[in-house]
Image (spheres, coloured by chain):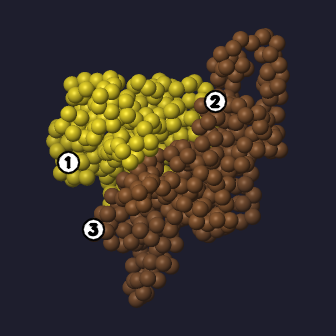
Amino acid sequence: MSTSAPFHFAPQAVAEEVTEIKRSALGTALEFCRRQPVGTLGMVLVLIIAVNGLGAEWIAPYNPTSNDFAAMTEAPSRTHLLGTDQLGRDIFSRIVFGARTALIVGFSSAIVGGFAGLVLGVASAYFGGRIDLIMQRFMDILMAFPLIIMALAIVSIFGTGVHNVIAAITIPLIPRCARVVRASALPIREVPYVDAARACGFGHTRIILRHMVPNVMAPFLIMLTAFVGQAILAEASLSYLGLGVQEPVPAWGLMLQGGAEEYATTAPWIAVFPGLAIMLTVFGFNLFGDALRDALDPKLRDR
Amino acid sequence: MYSYIAKRVLMTIPTLIGAAALVFILMRLIPGDVCVVRLGSGGGSFSEHSVQMCHAELGINRPMIVQFADFVWGLFTLNLGNSMWSGKPVVLEIATRLPISIEIALLAAVVAIVVAIPLGTISALKQNTWLDLVVRTAAIAGIATPSFWLGILSIVLVLNVTQAITGSPWMPPIEYVPLWKDPIRNLSMTLLPAITVGYRYAAVSMRMTRSTMLEVMREDYIRTARAKGLLRRIIINRHALKNALLPVVTLLGIEFAFLIGGLVVTEQVFNLNGIGRLFVLAVQNQDYTLTQALVMLVVAIFVFTNLVVDLTYAWLDPRIRFA
């Protein structure tokens, strides 16, 4: 049973494929779309969110933080596409700006946590022996904390706000990444070219970065996309609890916090749209990640 | 088998001690003096003497190693000090709120497993049909949907539907009654949270069941079983499912911790007075004694469920049992 090592892949095979097929980036993207229609849907969703996040100032019709007390809890209409909340703020604009917050937190946590995990995982596999053992026991301990619990504990220490939330989500992601990366780096350690590199007298850093890291890129990238989704979900949960991003920064979790239940019968759109935004974003990253897995790791296809 | 059990049980001890050390260190990373924060939270001034009194009360004027030994000993003897907010013993605060959380977690797990395993199996057997597509979409949506949003939506739905039917919106009871005393009242409180928090649990188990089932159905022994003319039902139940469920069991154990994490948010949505809500309150009030006790509780639950999973695994898989 290889439950601990879901990503096996033969580095030689990949090397052959790379020399065999040399396509332009655009060609690769088109091929991906043709083979992975569902993944393309995910990619499109991610792109839509990214465009919203990047160009929030130009896309949002209203200021996300300005109140219009003449138009409180207004139903979706032509003036307010998705209605307004209990403070008269335009929900559509807040969702557009919320995309930025979600992406900042999602990408920073996933990238920082992912790279830290990548280095730790590969190093753990490369050095092996006692270092590996100690590192793995330490990761075991970290993994015993569910993500949201660890994040809340960290928030309780450092306080709320965007930067602390990023730190709180990044730290629990590290062991999760290191685990998977280590599992796929272990077989690569035994590959002759790593011995060859060692025989050439290359330093540890060089062997790890130049010879081992590129070979665990496939599982790493797949995990990175999953992490972005997880981090966005975690951020939304923290913000919903009032322990994440703070007002007046527009964040999806925060939008669900105040009046969502209070106005359930009179203004249900307050509860519906921000959650839909979270769901579609995470959905997009998951679909894209799944398709990426199929494309990069043929062994796991059809699963 | 016994040596395996003993080894596995012993392995939990370093993890638990390590986790305790981590929690201990984390809680001491709090910038500034806990006592100053605590005394100053009211906005009033306080004397140097009262800060020292507070230090002595919390025992943080003693050497670190003594404090840590004390903390670990407290974990064993269930003496974790008093809540810094309410002043009541931490163990008491947790014990009064534990039943409802445990009930929801177990209910969610049961509902999820009962739904997920059959659906995952059917989805694998009918691969690439519309049924498979529906199940897969539902599963991937389950992973993407925040449980608290699902909770909010279900509340919005219930409120609107009951208002449309009866004229006034129905609210679930607020006070918890045990299941055996008043099952209807109890379930009207716990079922909806259990379903919302269990959706993700069901979704991941469904995906895992489907993928392992697909893998197992391609094995040689399944072909052999089919060739010798066994009934399809027997092949699936006795030959395929038994092997396919092994990784699912592992996943169920790991995801149970997620379920507990999900409770933190779900209890907030449904206004349930469980340990998840207590945890949020502890963090909001900067109640460090309570926070560290609750974190340790969750870690202990995680370590324990994983122990149970590994032992179940050994029981199911003779290769581990006799290794």
In primary-sequence order, the first of circles 2 and 3 is 3
Q: Quadrant of residue A216?
A: top left
Above or below, B181 relative to B289: below
Q: Share a chain, discs 2 and 3?
A: yes
Q: Label 1: how many residues lie within 10 Å, few (<14), some (14-19) or many (20+)? A: some
Q: Which residue is mark 3?
A: B130
Q: CA distance from mark 1 to mark 3?
A: 22 Å
* Residue assigned mark 1: A33
Chain identity of mark 1? A
Q: Colour of chain A?
A: yellow
The chain whose colour is brown is B
Comparing B247 with A198, the one in front is B247
Provide the residue designation for mark 2.
B285
* Whether residue B221 is situated above or below residue A157 in the rendered picture: below
Estimate the x, y position of residue A215 in percent, counting from the top left. 39, 40
Q: What amino acid does circle 2 point to? A: Asn
Residue type, numbered disc 3: Trp
Q: Is residue A84 above or below residue A10?
A: above
Question: Residue B105, image x and y in percent?
Answer: 58, 56
